[in-house]
Amino acid sequence: MEYVSRVPRPPLDGLIDDLYYLEGASPYARLMLPPSPSALLIVNLGAPFRIRGGTDLETAEYADGCVVTMPTRALDFGYPLWTRSVGVHFKPWGAAPFVPMPVAELCDRPVTVEQVWGRPAVAELRDRLATASGPHEMLTLLEDELMRRLGETAGLGLVRRTGSVIAATSGAVSIGDLSVAAGVSTTHLAQRFKELIGVTPKRLARSYRFTATLLAINPAEPIDWGDLAARAGYFDQAHFGHEFRAFTGLTPTRYIEVRRRFLREHPGHTLDNWPLPAD
């Protein structure tokens, strides 16, 4: 698969981790994406793909693309034989200025890009992307579209400042201390986070801690789960195992099995950091 990405220009860089272009054959028909502290926008330029956003939801098909606010559970992606898209990896608070509905309503419930930006605008954007000369021009077009849509969002400064502290500490920070430093109550802070991210500060901190722990695992080496849990600040290995299942639906040992399968069958693949076989 071809994967091209870049960080956007200011002020988008305070909202977005990267813009990306993806094209090629998926390594598996279905991939499981563990939840991470990030929101996602995909503008699809190929055949429709499918997403299951939670165990209580049916699998839905997305032709034009989708918007996924920060997930709390793993997502199951079903890809066509050949996929082509451009997209945005937002910081947890980054999607709020571009979504006209309350972000909390979208938690673990992906929506189409049409539902967010309207059919005419999305059709025009997809046409311009499809006729661009290459990935870099496509990312510039997407960046320009985001700049055009960027506006003021009430409470975003507060959420961005406190969220950035949570990110910098990988979740190892007292939410009470954050609210005191920000000069607001914990209730007010939680309300703003729910409005603009879809989860509370405490939940965001859990997500950052879990993600940092997961990315620290080297599946090619033996793993001392007890030591890993202790270093990550979990109360004990049982608590860590519970968090693992809550976030991914897998036990830690099962996760390693599928990670090793992915690396064994597709060494050096573009997507070898996060997605896992789901079939």
Image: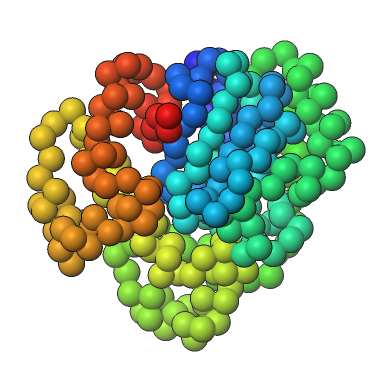
Give the answer, above or below, for where 226 lies relative to 153.
above
Give the answer, above or below, for where 147 lies relative to 273.
below
> Looking at the rendering, which quadrant does residue 175 occupy?
bottom left
> Looking at the rendering, which quadrant does residue 259 occupy?
top left
Q: Residue at x 39, y 19 (%)?
A: 269
Closer to the camera, 12 or 59?
59
Closer to the camera, 203 or 54?
54
- Coloring scheme used: rainbow
Q: Position of residue 37 (x, y in %)?
A: 45, 52
In the displayed structure image, the side of residue 150 where residue 36 appears, left or right: left
Closer to the camera, 233 or 135?
233
Q: Position of residue 46 (x, y in %)?
A: 69, 21
Res 58 seen here: yes
> Looking at the rendering, which quadrant does residue 243 occupy?
bottom left
Res 159 seen here: no
Q: Position of residue 200 (x, y in %)?
A: 49, 70
Q: Residue at x 42, y 65 (%)?
A: 203
Furthest residue to the right? 120
Q: Residue at x 10, y 52 (%)?
A: 227
Closer to the camera, 120 or 88?
120
Q: Residue at x 38, y 53 (%)?
A: 247
In the displayed structure image, the side of residue 69 where residue 217 appears, left or right: left
In the displayed structure image, the side of residue 264 where residue 180 appears, left or right: right
Give the answer, above or below, for where 126 lies relative to 162.
above
Q: Position of residue 251 (x, y in %)?
A: 27, 47
Total marks in image: 0
* Quadrant in which the C terminus is drawn: top left
